[in-house]
């Protein structure tokens, strides 16, 4: 009975991994678009960062 439970658990894990792989393959275009968009937004924020606005708070001379 324990062997059957282990075999079924292994089959369930294998099917779950297969489902995740299929979902990633099916939505690959959307995932890459999302990552590209997020990278561009982060790059814009990094470019707009300036240290001049915080010079009042620095006590270093």
Image: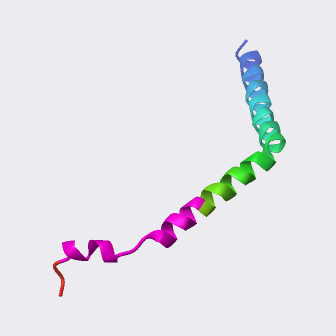
Q: Looking at the figure, which quarter contains the N terminus?
A: top right
User: In which image quadrant can residue 27 be found?
Assistant: top right
Residue at 35% over, 76% down: 51
Which x, y percent locates residue 18? Answer: 81, 35
The residue nearer to you, when weighing 36 against 22, is 36
Vertical placement of residue 19 versus 3, above or below: below
Tell whether 25 sits left or right of 52: right
Q: Quarter of the image holding residue 52?
A: bottom left
Residue 16 drawn above or below residue 36: above
State whether residue 32 is above or below residue 59. Answer: above
Residue furthest out toward the top: 1
Question: Looking at the image, which is closer to me, 27 or 13?
Answer: 27
Q: Is residue 56 left or right of residue 18?
A: left
Q: Residue 34 versus residue 48: which sits nearer the camera?
A: 48
Dominant secondary structure (helix, strand or loop) of the stretch shown in magenta: helix
- The image position of residue 61, as x and y in percent, is 17, 88
Residue at image coords 58%, 60%: 41
Q: Is residue 17 magenta?
A: no
Quick one: which residue is furthest to the bottom in this view?
61
Residue depicted at x 72% and y 17%: 5
Which residue range is magenta in the image?
A: 41-58
Q: Is residue 43 magenta?
A: yes
Which residue lies at the image location 55% right of the left edge and 62% below the top edge? 42
């Amino acid at each position: 009975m324990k062997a059957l439970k282990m075999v079924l658990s292994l089959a369930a894990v294998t099917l779950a991994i297969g489902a995740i792989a299929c979902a990633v393959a099916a939505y690959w275009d959307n995932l890459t678009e999302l990552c590209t968009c997020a990278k561009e937004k982060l790059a814009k924020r990094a470019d707009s960062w300036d240290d001049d606005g915080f010079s009042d708070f620095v006590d270093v001379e």
